[in-house]
Image: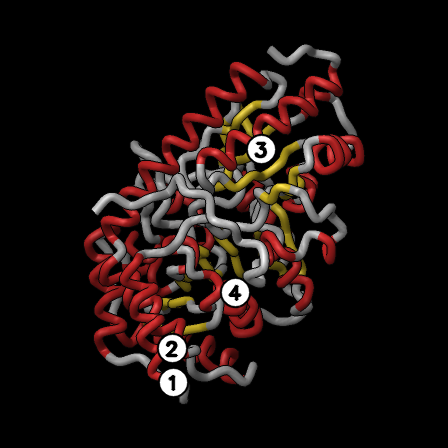
Amino acid sequence: MKYDFDTLIDRHGTKSLKYDFAKERGRDEDILPLWVADMDFRTVPEVSKRLADAALYGIYGYSEAKEDYFEAIRSWYEKHFNWNPEAEWLIKTPGVVFAIAAAFRAFTKPGEGVLIQQPVYYPFSEAIKDNGRVPVNSPLKLEHGHYEVDFEDFEQKIKEQNVRLFLLCSPHNPVGRVWKEEELRRMGDICLAHGVKIVSDEIHGDFTYPGHHQTVFASLGEAYAKNSVICTAPSKTFNLAGLQVSNIFIPDPELRRQFKKAVDAAGYSQLNLMGLIGCQAAYETGEEWLSQLKEYLAENLNFVRTYLQENIPQIHLIEPEGTYLLWLDFRTLGLTEAQRVDLIEKKAHLWVDSGAMFGVDGEGFERINIACPRATLKQALDQLRDAVNAQTGRQTA
């Protein structure tokens, strides 16, 4: 079956955070959104069918998963990542950020440090502070258009700033790195040497571009698995964020006990019915849909790369290895943060995520979401081109 990712779908009036809340968030109502990480595509048809069947059934009582739910996830990870998790490792939560916050409470004490690598997904630092822990930044190094881990700084921060937990973003959002196995091992070895636990957010793990492969951190070996919490979800992969379902794998029994205690203390027990149904259906039936989607996203990436080179050479693409989020370098324009916001939101009428949200190391950059029809992407880039040309006095061809 050939899936359609080109059709424009009007999401206004659907309670969409992306489309229906511009005014509430201080933007013009006609702004074109390329910000929050959900997709403008319909999900796998079988997912929609099973959800519709459940909705029509009309009874929405307390629900729980059985063995076939876990088997759908296990089979997916075995086939696509050569990783074979065990059923007892699984704890289900209503989101990865919920799980990360629970991990802070389970494995660290108030005032202790949590290591992050900025520029990084901004809810990380928010969750650290909200839980009374201290964010410790070991920034990634940008060298020749490519982000790298500063291993010397990484270890120094752990030793000097009372770090007890490392929050790994893998693949990395927003810079698009898919970590090589040797990079993961080196970070893992440093953490093991200093008694630092690792929580690995792998929610974007299914999105890698040709030539790159996602390595599940726990698949590196027993020592790494027993020191880690692996956070997964179908939400990015199959556009199911609104169903609020995540699958957290913790191989070590004691870490799992501590984590479950933190989840229980938050008053949470079972996932919602639709999340359980949607997740299982996606992993059971979504393989071909995802394959075609990844081809489409790769074409979108090529489109953006060529468009910038030919029409807005002042804006540079940081070449991604994974995710459907692009990290764009606006620094050549020489604008302040306020001037760049004015250019993008008021002149180009685009809603994107300012790089400054991801930490001081993101200043001068912008994150855009390319999981949309190409016509939407072209419209956004045309608007950006016209705004930049007006700003610089350059004529549009």
Q: Secondary structure at mark 3?
A: helix
Label 1 Cα neighbours within 10 Å, binned few <14 / some 14-19 / many ≥20? few
Whole-percent x, y for residue 151 in the image: 50, 39
Residue type at numbered disc 4 = Ile
Q: CA distance from mark 1 to mark 3?
A: 41 Å
The residue that label 3 is drawn on is: 380
The residue that label 2 is drawn on is: 55
Please report contact status of discs 1 and 3: CB closer than 8 Å, yes or no.
no
Residue type at numbered disc 1 = Gly
Question: On screen, 393 above or below 238?
Answer: above
- In this rendering, position of residue 277 left or right of residue 120: left
For marks 1 and 4, the one nearer the N-term is 1
- In this rendering, position of residue 353 left or right of residue 284: right
Numbered label attached to residue 309? none
Q: Residue at x 28, y 42 (%)?
A: 292
The residue that label 1 is drawn on is: 58
Q: CA distance from mark 3 to mark 4?
A: 33 Å
Residue type at numbered disc 3 = Ala
Task: Indicate which label's residue lies in the foreground, 1 or 4.
Answer: 1
Q: CA distance from mark 2 to mark 4?
A: 31 Å
For marks 3 and 4, the one nearer the N-term is 4
For marks 2 and 4, the one nearer the N-term is 2
Q: Secondary structure at mark 1?
A: loop
Q: CA distance from mark 2 to mark 1?
A: 6 Å
Numbered label attached to residue 100? 4
Please report contact status of discs 2 and 1: CB closer than 8 Å, yes or no.
yes
